Image (cartoon, rainbow, N blue to C red):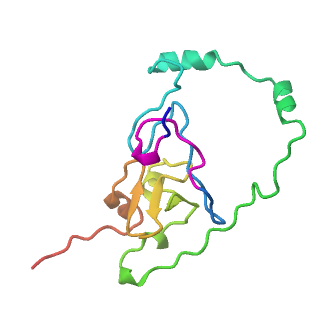
Amino acid sequence: MPIKGILKQVEGIEVFPRQDELADGEFGNGIRAPLGIHRANVHRYWFEDAGSNLEDQMAFLRGVKRLTRNDLETFTEGLSIPDSIGTRPPIKPVSYPAWNNGGFQILQHVTVRAQRSGNYWTRCPSCAREGRDRAGDNLAISIADPRFYKCWAGCTREMIRAALGQPIHERSYR
C-alpha cells in the first residue's frame, strides 16, 4: 500500500510521527481516530474493516475483544512512565511584531493553552460565551502571523471580536 504524503500521494496509509524531530515544547501531529470528524474537511473517518455506515461501525466495535484489568496488568508489567511525561514546559511569552501598528491583537485578549502544528490553541471567546468549547481548544491562532485566527466550531471573526468587546468597526471611505 502506498504511503500518504510521499510524492504528494493523496491515498494510502499515514505514518506517525511525521516529524523527524521536535523542539522543546512542541507537539507532533495529532492522530485521526476512527469515527471522528475532521475539523477542516468535515469528513468522518471509519474503521477500515467495517462498512462505511454507523451501524456497521458500531457492530465492528462491539465485536472487538475487551481487555480485562488482568490483561492490562499483564501487558504493562515491568513498564514505567518516563519522568518527562506529564511535565510540560511553559508556553513562551508571545511578542507582538511591529507590523501590527497598534491595531487589534487577539493574543492580548486570550490565554494561549497549547502550541502545535504552527498554531497557538485556545478557547474561542464566542464559543465560551455560548457555553461551548469545554475543551478550550476551538480557536487556532497562527504563530507566524497572529492576525490570522480561526474557530474550528464555525464562529466568524466578527462573532469572536464581539465576544471580546472589540467589534470590528466599519471603515468610512469618504
**Looking at the rendering, which quadrant does residue 24 occupy?**
bottom right
Q: Is residue 135 left or right of residue 97?
A: right
- At 48% from the left and 70% from the top, the residue drawn is 107
Q: Is residue 8 magenta?
A: yes
The image position of residue 127, as x and y in percent, is: 44, 52
**Looking at the rendering, which quadrant does residue 59 occupy?**
top right
Name the magenta segment's main secondary structure.
Answer: loop
Q: Is residue 160 magenta?
A: no
Q: Looking at the image, is 68 positioned above or below residue 41?
A: above
- At 21% from the left and 70% from the top, the residue drawn is 170
The total of numbered circles placed on residues is 0
Q: Looking at the image, is 41 positioned above or below residue 29?
A: above
Q: Quadrant of the C terminus?
A: bottom left
The image position of residue 141, as x and y in percent, is: 45, 63
Q: Is residue 167 left or right of residue 151?
A: left
The image position of residue 118, as x and y in percent, is: 49, 62
- Residue at far left of view: 174
- At 39% from the left and 67% from the top, the residue drawn is 165
The image position of residue 32, as x and y in percent, is: 53, 40
Q: Nearer the viewer, residue 29 or 62?
A: 29
Magenta stretch bounds: 4-19
**Looking at the rendering, which quadrant does residue 60 occupy?**
top right
Q: Looking at the image, is 73 positioned above or below residue 94?
A: above
Q: Looking at the image, is 42 positioned above or below residue 108?
A: above
